[in-house]
Image (spheres, grey):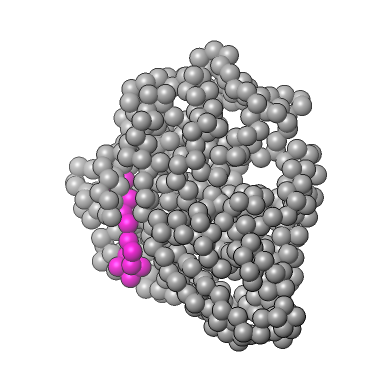
């Protein structure tokens, strides 16, 4: 879930985030006072808990990664791997040994000093204690050892093009050896913020970590504020109760913020693929002809215009344009209802009913209505069942795979391998050739990686393993003068450390 949910989102997950900010200096809402510089940040889906080592979905790392937990490396806003807790590193000529040189004078929020011992502990713990599907990205690590307090050597069992990139995600988070007893409620990290309070169903509050080793954030306090209603969030910005909305949950409402003297609209892209997921292991969707028929039956341009006001981009595959192996596959399944009916007849399904179990998130609800209408034109009856997100959707769809179709925004970066390379993932897609191509891509040269990933993406798209509705846009509205908001969202974390209030 951008899930796997994994890198879902929906996100996980995965769902899409909606940020709100209140500037304390201006005396606006969010619990601010005149003596504090406060930003209130709201999401449409509240985390079920604060432990992303055992709970899938993107809601937790969106809030905590980089802000509370830090890794050895992170992604900058252009998608480049840059130093964080590791100030530098070297890679051996055979690409199997990474030597990391750590920042000095780093402490966790529990007062413990961060050393190479914590790196060894954190990397090994992914393999032994983590529960989520993303943990498999650490399987390639054969050994991790401390050379001295500020030097760590990681040895891989084989060359891996993806491992260092994965270390920018949640699996690369560094934990205190004495701070993992209550991760669901009490995160202990090295980041610029620390948890002050969590009011379940309402908000999570972070305060600045005054002992932070790096550049101090500009804000004294950040409140993550959760909204279930997009209209309420829009009204809060219009009336001055918040400073920022991101992501806009009703794109057609953007005209409300046309006053350039008050608001600034930020529009860019993400790596979040809004996917119409198919349960490839269950009839009738274990029949390729049925899956292909659904792809032919969907007018993606009309869906994007209707469901999301034309905001976003059609992609035709699980690869966003920001990835090196992107290829425009939107023409592979052109809108062709007659072809869809022909394939359904061949498969013996002139009248078909499918259960579409979706998260109760705006983009999924809006898209589902269009999918239902378009599939009805070719003789497929769609029964839409919204599920509370994240808990209910994660349990029923992601964990149990009890569904025919779903719609989720996969926001984790480069998630095609996790989504389609694991037969036990919720789509239940099992293709040995695709898995071989993923392995070739990971171990090969840069050119081999790009070629193998392109081929795998084409096979997945042609096989109609899912339908790729659109690439989710990064669409924000900010109070004039708010700075640090990213044009493009390419990480599973939402970096609060560079924001400042108007």
Residue 200 visible, this orientation: yes
In screen coordinates, is 494 left or right of 378? left
- On the image, the x and y values in percent for residue 159 come to 73, 32
* Residue drawn at x 71%, y 60% as measured from the top left: 460
Residues drawn in magenta: 222-234
Q: Can residue 226 be found in the magenta stretch?
A: yes
- On the image, the x and y values in percent for residue 271 come to 58, 55
Residue 91 visible, this orientation: no
Give the answer, above or below, for where 437 lies relative to 232: above
Identify the residue at the far left of this view.
34
- On the image, the x and y values in percent for residue 319 come to 66, 57
Q: Can residue 170 be found in the magenta stretch?
A: no
In screen coordinates, is 496 left or right of 426? left
* Residue drawn at x 67%, y 71% as measured from the top left: 291
* Residue drawn at x 37%, y 50% as measured from the top left: 48
Give the answer, above or below, for where 466 lies relative to 157: below
């Amino acid at each position: 879930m951008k899930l796997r949910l994994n890198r879902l989102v929906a996100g996980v997950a995965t769902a899409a985030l909606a940020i709100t900010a209140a500037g304390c200096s201006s005396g606006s809402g969010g619990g601010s006072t005149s003596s504090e510089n406060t930003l209130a940040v709201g999401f449409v889906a509240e985390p079920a808990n604060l432990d992303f080592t055992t709970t899938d979905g993107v809601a937790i790392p969106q809030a905590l990664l980089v802000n509370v937990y830090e890794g050895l490396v992170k992604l900058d806003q252009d998608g480049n791997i840059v130093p964080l807790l590791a100030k530098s590193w070297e890679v051996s000529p055979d690409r199997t040994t990474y030597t990391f040189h750590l920042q000095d004078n780093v402490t966790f929020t529990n007062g413990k000093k961060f050393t190479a011992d914590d790196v060894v502990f954190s990397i090994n713990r992914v393999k032994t204690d983590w529960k989520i599907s993303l943990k498999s990205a650490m399987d390639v690590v054969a050994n991790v050892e401390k050379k001295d307090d500020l030097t760590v050597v990681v040895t891989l069992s084989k060359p891996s093009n993806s491992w260092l990139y994965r270390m920018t995600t949640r699996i690369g988070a560094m934990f205190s050896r004495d701070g993992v007893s209550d991760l669901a409620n009490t995160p202990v990290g090295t980041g610029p913020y620390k948890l002050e309070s969590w009011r379940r169903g309402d908000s999570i509050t972070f305060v600045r970590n005054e002992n932070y080793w790096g550049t101090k954030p500009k804000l004294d306090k950040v409140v993550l504020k959760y909204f279930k209603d997009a209209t309420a969030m829009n009204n809060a910005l219009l009336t001055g109760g918040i400073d920022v909305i991101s992501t806009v949950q009703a794109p057609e409402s953007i005209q409300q913020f046309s006053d350039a003297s008050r608001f600034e609209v930020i529009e860019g892209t993400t790596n979040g693929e809004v996917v119409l997921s198919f349960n490839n292991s269950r009839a009738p969707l274990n029949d390729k002809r049925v899956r292909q028929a659904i792809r032919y039956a969907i007018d993606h341009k009309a869906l994007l215009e209707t469901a999301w006001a034309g905001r976003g981009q059609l992609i035709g595959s699980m690869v966003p344009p920001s990835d090196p192996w992107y290829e425009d596959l939107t023409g592979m399944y052109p809108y062709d209802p007659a072809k869809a009916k022909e394939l359904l007849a061949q498969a013996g399904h002139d009248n078909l009913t499918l259960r579409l179990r979706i998260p109760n998130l705006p983009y999924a609800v809006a898209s589902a209505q269009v999918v239902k209408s378009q599939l009805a034109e070719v003789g497929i009856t769609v029964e839409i069942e919204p599920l509370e997100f994240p808990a209910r959707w994660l349990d029923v769809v992601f964990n149990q795979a009890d569904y025919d179709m779903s719609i989720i925004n996969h926001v984790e970066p480069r998630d095609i391998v996790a989504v389609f390379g694991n037969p036990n993932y919720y789509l239940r897609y099992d293709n040995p050739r695709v898995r071989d191509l993923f392995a070739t891509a990971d171990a090969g040269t840069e050119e081999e990686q790009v070629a193998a990933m392109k081929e795998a993406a084409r096979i997945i798209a042609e096989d109609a393993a899912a339908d790729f509705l659109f690439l989710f846009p990064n669409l924000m509205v900010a109070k004039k003068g708010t700075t640090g908001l990213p044009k493009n969202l390419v990480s599973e974390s939402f970096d609060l450390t560079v924001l400042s209030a108007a």
